[in-house]
Amino acid sequence: MNIVFEYIKYRLNAKYLHGIHSPFVYKFMSEGMNIQIKKEQQTEIQKFIESSKSNNKEIQVKDYGAKSKKLKSQRTVSQIFKTSSSFGKNALLLYRLSNYFKPKHILELGTSIGVGTLHLHLGHPESKIVSIEGCPQTHDLSRQNLQRENIKLINKTFYDHIKSLNHELFDLIFIDGHHDGEALKYYLQLLKKHTHNDTIIVLDDIRWSDSMLDAWKELIKEKDFHLSMDFFRMGILVKRQQQEKEHFILKLKK
């Protein structure tokens, strides 16, 4: 996959407000995308970022899915942070989604060191977040970083945790791990009974590889999802059976 070509295509087609005919999407883009992180929360995030960027402690990372294209299994915390997609505009998108939709129950598959988890939490601190990380040492690190009342961190594989769920329903699901198209589709199939009509499903790294991009293209055509939004690195799926099936390529806003 030529990522430069993909980005050019995205930039040529991405919209902000003009040409968006879905009231649901238009309202989110006009209101949700203007949400800014509160000053006191910015201080907390910045402290987290500076601590992670300067942390040269090495940990042994156990990859259960597609391995990092850039890093060896022995990695410093700062290296893991630099390759995290839950940073900058993408992290801000997570914060805005949480703040705007105010989900009561969030499931995150792929805690890593907890940057995305923190943004989801700060967006709506009342949300109860369950975040899954398969790597034991990365999980231990995120536990040190995220000691919050409404955040539950679990060291399990994605598959084992999903299979252990009973009748839980989630309002927002963030899948940030494995990075394999077939695995992504399989997890979403398993998670169907844990979603409702308005569950926001956020998929990370939809252009990580040909496999991930092919899976994304298939998912946006699925009849189960009437709404899909492409933010280049992240994709969003929602059932919303009450609306006509629509797909939007959208610009991220700082």
Image (cartoon, rainbow, N blue to C red):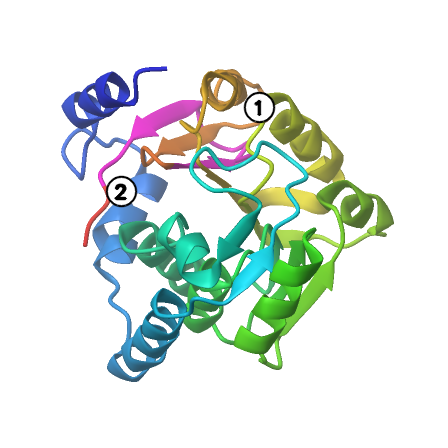
Which amino acid type is marked by label 2? Tyr
**Nearer to me, 83 or 33:** 83
Answer left or right for 21 relative to 129.
left
Q: Position of residue 55 (x, y in %)?
A: 42, 70
Above or below: residue 106 compared with residue 57: above
Residue 77 in the magenta stretch? The answer is no
Res 29 seen here: yes
Residue at 72% in and 44% down: 158
Q: Position of residue 147 (x, y in %)?
A: 59, 80
Task: Give the residue at mark 2.
Answer: 26
Which amino acid type is marked by label 1? Gly
Task: Give the residue at mark 1.
Answer: 181
Residue at 70% in and 51% down: 134
- The residue carrying pointer 2 sits among few (fewer than 14), some (14 to 19) or many (20 or more) residues within 10 Å by Cα, namely some
Above or below: residue 207 compared with residue 47: above
Above or below: residue 45 compared with residue 120: below
Residue 182: quarter of image: top right
Residue 169 bears which disc, if any?
Answer: none
Residue 246 in the magenta stretch? The answer is yes
Q: Which residues are magenta?
A: 234-251
Instruction: State yes or no: discs 1 and 2 in contact (Cβ < 8 Å).
Output: no
Image quarter of the C terminus: bottom left
- Give how far apart the Cα atoms at labels 1 and 2 are: 29 Å
Q: Secondary structure at mark 1?
A: helix
Pointer 1 or 2: first along the chain: 2
Residue 45: quarter of image: bottom left
**Nearer to me, 143 or 128:** 143
Residue 206: quarter of image: top left
Image quarter of the N terminus: top left
- Which mark's residue is nearer the viewer, 1 or 2? 1
Q: Position of residue 229 (x, y in %)?
A: 38, 33
Res 146 seen here: no
